[in-house]
Image (spheres, grey):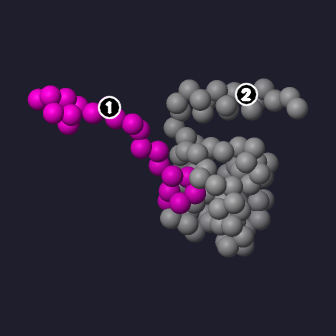
């Protein structure tokens, strides 16, 4: 029901534009864990996060991780970088030259 103080702090950090990447799909994450034959605990220990955090990624309760953690997870699971946590390309407004006003 309630959200812990730590979770609120984490959510604010993600919302405020800190360097993070969103998980593309919880099913793909679970499949990658199975393919790597890695338990939640083993993955957590390898990448330096809590088992609970890995579990939250599996269930969709958490959908983002810092860039460094996302890359460590992808490396540990043996998937290409960006497969589970794609790099978001920021929307760039067109320049005057690109829209024909130059």
**Secondary structure type for disc 2:** helix
Per the image, the residue denoted by label 1 is 93
Task: Give the main secondary structure of the magenta stretch.
Answer: loop
Image quadrant assignment for residue 29:
bottom right
Q: Which segment is the magenta one?
A: 81-102
| In-image side of 93 versus 54 (left or right) | left
Residue 68 lies, with reference to residue 12, above or below; the image says below
Residue at 57%, 68% in the rendered image: 78
Mark 2 is surrounded, within 10 Å at the Cα level, by few (under 14), some (14 to 19) or many (20 or more) other residues, namely: few
Image quadrant assignment for residue 66:
top right
Per the image, the residue denoted by label 2 is 8
Q: Say which of 98 and 48 sits in front.
A: 98
Residue at 88%, 32% in the rendered image: 1
Query: How far separated are the C-alphas under marks 1 and 2?
Result: 32 Å
**Secondary structure type for disc 1:** loop
| In-image side of 79 versus 5 (left or right) | left
Image quadrant assignment for residue 91:
top left
Mark 1 is surrounded, within 10 Å at the Cα level, by few (under 14), some (14 to 19) or many (20 or more) other residues, namely: few
């Amino acid at each position: 029901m309630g959200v812990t103080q730590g979770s609120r702090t984490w959510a604010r950090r993600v919302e405020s534009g800190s360097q993070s990447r969103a998980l593309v799909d919880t099913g793909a994450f679970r499949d990658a864990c199975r393919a790597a034959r890695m338990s939640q605990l083993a993955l957590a220990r390898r990448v330096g996060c809590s088992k609970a955090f890995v579990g939250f990624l599996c269930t969709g309760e958490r959908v983002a991780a810092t860039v460094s953690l996302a890359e460590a997870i992808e490396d540990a699971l043996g998937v290409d970088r960006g497969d589970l946590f794609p790099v978001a390309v920021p929307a760039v407004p067109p320049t005057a030259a690109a829209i024909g006003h130059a």
